[in-house]
Amino acid sequence: MKISGHESLRDFYRYIRITPEEAANLVQDIWAKRGNIINMDHPVKNVY
């Protein structure tokens, strides 16, 4: 988190007001549109 200046990933997610699951879903959508995605049927792990 050196670029944003946040001490932890949790602080960063609190700052941008998005959950890790929402972030993962956004990345998955972007990769799906680009055609570079692997099937991700497993649940997202909690990062806290």
Image (cartoon, helix red, strand yellow):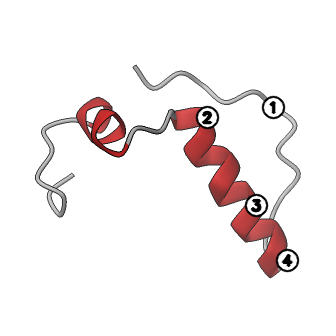
- Name the residue furthest bottom: 34
Q: Name the residue under label 2.
A: 21
Question: How far is the residue under mark 2 from the one under mark 3?
Answer: 12 Å
Question: How far is the residue under mark 4 from the one under mark 1?
Answer: 19 Å
Pointer 4 local density, CA inside 10 Å: few below 14, some 14–19, many at least 20: few
Please tell me whether residue 27 is drawn above or below residue 48 in the rendered image. Answer: below
Circles 4 and 1: CB atoms closer than 8 Å: no
Q: Name the residue under label 1.
A: 42
**What amino acid type should be assigned to the residue bearing mark 4?**
Gly
Spot occupied by residue 47 in the image (x, y as percentages of width and height): 45, 26
Spot occupied by residue 29 in the image (x, y as percentages of width and height): 76, 61
Residue 17 lies in what quarter of the image? top left
**SS at badge 1:** loop
- Observer-nearest of 40 and 12: 12
**SS at badge 3:** helix
Question: How far is the residue under mark 2 from the one under mark 1?
Answer: 12 Å
The answer to whether residue 32 is left or right of residue 46 is: right
Q: Which mark is residue 35?
A: 4
The answer to whether residue 20 is left or right of residue 39 is: left
Residue visible at 15% across and 45% down in the picture: 6
Query: Closer to the camera: disc 3 or disc 1?
Result: 3
Q: Earlier in the sequence, mark 2 or mark 3?
A: 2
Pointer 2 local density, CA inside 10 Å: few below 14, some 14–19, many at least 20: some
Query: Closer to the camera: disc 4 or disc 2?
Result: 2
Please tell me whether residue 29 is drawn above or below residue 9 in the rendered image. Answer: below
**What amino acid type should be assigned to the residue bearing mark 2?**
Glu
Q: Earlier in the sequence, mark 4 or mark 3?
A: 3
